[in-house]
Amino acid sequence: MSYLAATLGAMTTPVDPSPPGSPDPQGVPEPPRHDPSAALSVRGLWKRFGQKTAVAGVSLDVPAGSFYGLVGPNGAGKTTMLSMATGLLRPDLGGAWVHGVDLWARPDVAKATLGVLPDGVRLFDRLTGRQLLTYAGMLRGMEKDTVIERTDDLLLAFDLGADADTFVVDYSAGMTKKIALGSAMIHAPRTLVLDEPFEAVDPVSAANIRDILKDYVAGGGTVIVSSHVMDLVQRMCDHVAVMAAGQVLAAGTVDEVRGEQSLEDRFVDLVGGRQHSEGLSWLRGS
Amino acid sequence: MVARFVTLKLTLMGNTFRKSVWQTIGMVVAALYALGVVGALVTLVGALAYVGDPAWAGLAITLGGALTVVGWWIIPIFAFGVDATLDPHRFATYAIPRRTLLAGLAVAGLVSVPGIATVLVAIGTSFAWVLEPGVLVVALLGAVLGVATCVIGSRAITTLLAPVLESRRYREVVTIVAVMLVVMTGPLIGWLANDVEVSVEADPGSGSSMGMLLLPLFEQAAALVGWTPFGAAWSLAGTAHDGDWAGLAGHLAVALGTIGLAWLVWDRALARALERPPVGDGSGGKAKGLGAFGRVPFSPTWAVAARTATYWVRDPRYSGSIAIVPLLPVVMYVSAQSTGNFFMLLATGPFVAWILGFSISNDVGYDNTAFALHVAAGVDGRADRWGRAIPMLLVGPVVCVATVVVSVWIADSWHLTLPLLGLSLGLLLVGTAVSCAVSARLVYPVAKPGESPLKSPQGAATATIVSQGLGFLVTAGLSLPVLAMGVAALMLGGVLWGAATLVVCVLYGALILVLAVRFGARVYNRRLPELLQQVQSFP
């Protein structure tokens, strides 16, 4: 604990005091134990890039079987936090547990139960859609027959059958998102962590993906999605966490977090930053 | 408006300076080099005019100018997209009249090291006629027209061909051709120079210089080139000097016609480009079935191997460098021909082996952020390392053996086959081994997927030099036993020595490979997220 305090003291950029009612990483550094029953449990995650603190002491429990939404403005640290919770980025401090398995101590065991859709990374796009799915399955050490069967199922479910033999580099943005989603699901993970899964995806495909994810949750899986679209999160998720400036401002079931308001209004209240000025008066039509 | 385009271009250049010290240094070196070339050319033409005959200067300007125009027109086709700072598409949403846009882009096109150098040389060489003021005026007009031909013609061609150039498949083909051309330039020049040397040496008695011998040839060429779009503008002064007024009018007509036509083509092409922004070529690349993935055992190791093999064929960043390998023996053969020394030719096998082994030393860098899939899946280091090495271990030996056999066949030194095979295979194994270990630790930026391999990433010079240098040193150090054994066998001769070399080198290489993969896998497993972070931080 003294180590943590020393590190906190050494941080040159002061952390904004958290709003009342949310966990305060400076006053109460971290709950001592992770929740072993949670699908994903992170404790005291910190990450700095140079002068910028991207994630400042995030602790979060994602209950098994929940459909968990993570919302926050641009630059809130969502992607950084999810990367640290899935083994893509080593945290400066803190840890992550997947179904009670320490991700950073036993990454091979933990990663086997995780399906990850990272945001802002390339794909091996010189492969065809079918080859990419097969590759993802093979990397997970799956059996040949299973991989071939699930590849066909996924191509069908994501409406990519006609483009199965086209190079991913020639896919549209939405198709690329879908094939990336497919390669995160092919090994039937217990937990899916999806960073911005609906970005650039057309409404019909988005509805299909939502159905697939709902089925998956109904079958006992856990889904964590990050998104900008409050409305979508409110309709789709049963739990939500609001992040801003590298901290979790509120977390819980959607009803707990939003109270009497809509999620969007509550989000704006929490995060702030709405302009109540005259706006761009000159922009009104002449 | 034109001034604003020039300012924009200068600002863009200035910003690149601010981004990286290395780029500034590179730019300064390029500028100094260009200045040197400008100075040399102007001095040369001036000397021709004052020391020799002004007509010679006219010849030089016509032929050199025509070459410059060809360069301006052809090079952008190969280097397309390498510099798109003022891509007309970026101005599509602004309401700029097309005429203004054209003028602005044309002038801004001159604001670059080659552009400024061209202007300086064109104007500087005009002063070869300083003793004849009338001709000087014509020469300056010719210089302006010549530069205009360069810039407008170049823009017209790239804009006209943009729809083709932007298609992925075309870019890939052109890229590979360009890489091969770059590799072949050196030997070609050497070969040509050699031939000229031979033809001059063949006639030493006459005492005349090479220039005298070739003068009629140059005169004929210049007379012809002066009537083509390439040389018309540049030949104006020479024609005026000769007092051929009808010819002057004709050349001027060709020059103006060229510029007018190029302007018209560019205008039309730009109008079309702005109205129809680039979209994918629709069809897209296709490959049936699972390809390499269907032909390997189902395991993570072989998955990586199949993916690597697929990329060698499909990704021009890999296939470009593979296309060089068959050229190396040709290059070596040409140089062996000219020197009459077969040592270089016989060294081809080991050299190719070294290059091959080294070529996968930055594999993770080539993956770029697609590597995230390996990290998310938690691929074991051993699977990743072996997977990347397997295609090399399957194809490399075949290539090495073929190269060695062909080289000893041409050199007619069959008795060296066994030691050369041992050397080559040993170097291939050691090189691959070092690559397997190094690529888990030292990653440096390379051209991103889909970019031209000729485009070197910005601000990566230090990392590249350090990583490659270290890899080179380690490979060299670990190859010492192979080299010693090979050289000893080559010196001592004898089938027994040869066979022993082959066996020992291969066994030694295999041992190093196993150890290096084990080491590389440990490093990989320990720093998997850091590797990803490194490729994510690439500019």
Image (cartoon, coloured by chain):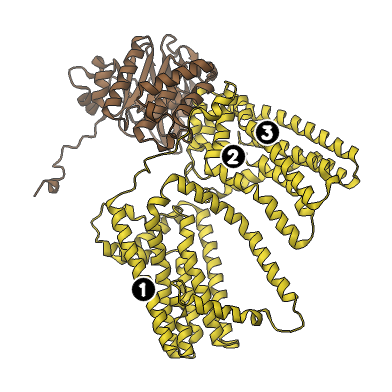
Chain colours: A brown, B yellow
Task: Name the mark on residue B283.
Answer: none
Name the residue tied to disc 2.
Answer: B362
Give the residue type at disc 1: Gly
> Around disc 2, counting alpha carbons within 10 Å, would you say few (fewer than 14), some (14 to 19), or many (20 or more)?
many
Q: Earlier in the sequence, mark 1 or mark 2?
A: 1
Q: Is residue B169 above or below residue B438?
A: below
Q: Nearer the viewer, mark 3 or mark 1?
A: 1
Q: Quadrant of residue B212?
A: bottom right
Name the residue tied to disc 1.
Answer: B257
> Around disc 1, counting alpha carbons within 10 Å, would you say few (fewer than 14), some (14 to 19), or many (20 or more)?
some
Of the pair B390 and B191, the residue shown nearer to us: B191
Whole-number angstrom distance, CA of label 2 to CA of label 3: 17 Å
Numbered disc 1: what chain? Answer: B
Whole-number angstrom distance, CA of label 3 to CA of label 1: 58 Å
Q: Residue at x 53, y 23 (%)?
A: A139
Name the residue tied to disc 3.
Answer: B393
Assign a secondary structure to mark 3.
helix
| Marks 3 and 1 close (CB-CB < 8 Å) | no
Q: Residue at x 18, y 20 (%)?
A: A261
Give the residue type at disc 2: Asn
Of the pair B60 and A114, the residue shown nearer to us: B60
Give the residue type at disc 3: Leu
Q: Nearer the viewer, mark 1 or mark 2?
A: 1
